[in-house]
Image (cartoon, rainbow, N blue to C red):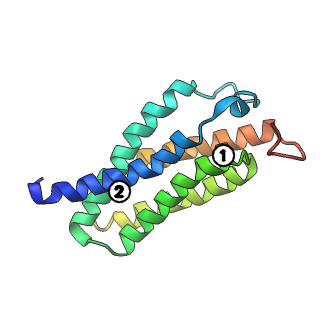
Amino acid sequence: MDAASLPSLVAFLGLNFLAALTGALFRPGSWYAGLAKPSWRPPDSLFGPVWAVLYVSIAVAGWLVWQRTGFGTAILVYLVSLVFNAGWSVIFFGLRRIDWGLAWMIGLWLSILATILVFAPVSTTAALLLLPYLAWVSFAAALNFAIWRLNRSPSFAAG
């Protein structure tokens, strides 16, 4: 990497930091602690480190494609995916809508898949960097679904 490409890498890291910020602003809290959760849910302490690694890989993937194409369809799809990423914490933890969170998670999963598909012809490395992200969001969607099933009631926003 040359010095001229450093600002764009920092920009991509910054974009991912902004997406991650919603997870810091809309924390699980007592509402989430009171929900029934499946026995296979990992400890809460695992989520932060996993997401930190994923956000760096997401940023690097976007940056690699940016280096080759600049702003275009691939980066636009990438940005849509970041919006879906940022929105989930707002919906699930902020609005306390498990059902809407699940629906949003499906959109997030599809946007990650779309990003991988548009990145692959440009940079195989960038596409591969997003596979752990897709896998983790697949797991998170299964967890969201399980929490929804365990906590179904007339009002998902109760608590």
- Kindly state the secondary structure of the residue where label 1 is placed: helix
Residue at (17, 54) in percent of width and height:
6
* Residue 30, position as x, y percentages in the image: 70, 29
Q: Nearer the viewer, residue 15 or 135?
A: 15
Give neighbour class at mark 1: few <14, some 14-19, many 20+ (Cα, 10 Å).
Answer: some
Type of the residue with mark 1: Gly
Q: Earlier in the sequence, mark 1 or mark 2?
A: 1
* Image quadrant where residue 3 sits: bottom left
Give the labeled residue for mark 2.
127
Relative height, residue 116 to residue 89 (above, below)? below
Q: Residue furthest left?
A: 2
Which residue is disc 1 drawn over? 94
Residue lying at the far front of the rendered structure: 25
Residue shown at 65% from the left, 38% from the top: 143
Q: Is residue 155 left or right of residue 30?
A: right
Q: Image height check: is 100 above or below 23?
A: below
Q: Nearer the viewer, residue 158 or 134?
A: 158
- Helix, strand or loop status at disc 2: helix
Residue at 31% from the left image edge and 68% from the top image edge: 121
Image side of residue 62 versus residue 36, left or right: left
Rendering coords of residue 151 (x, y %): 81, 37
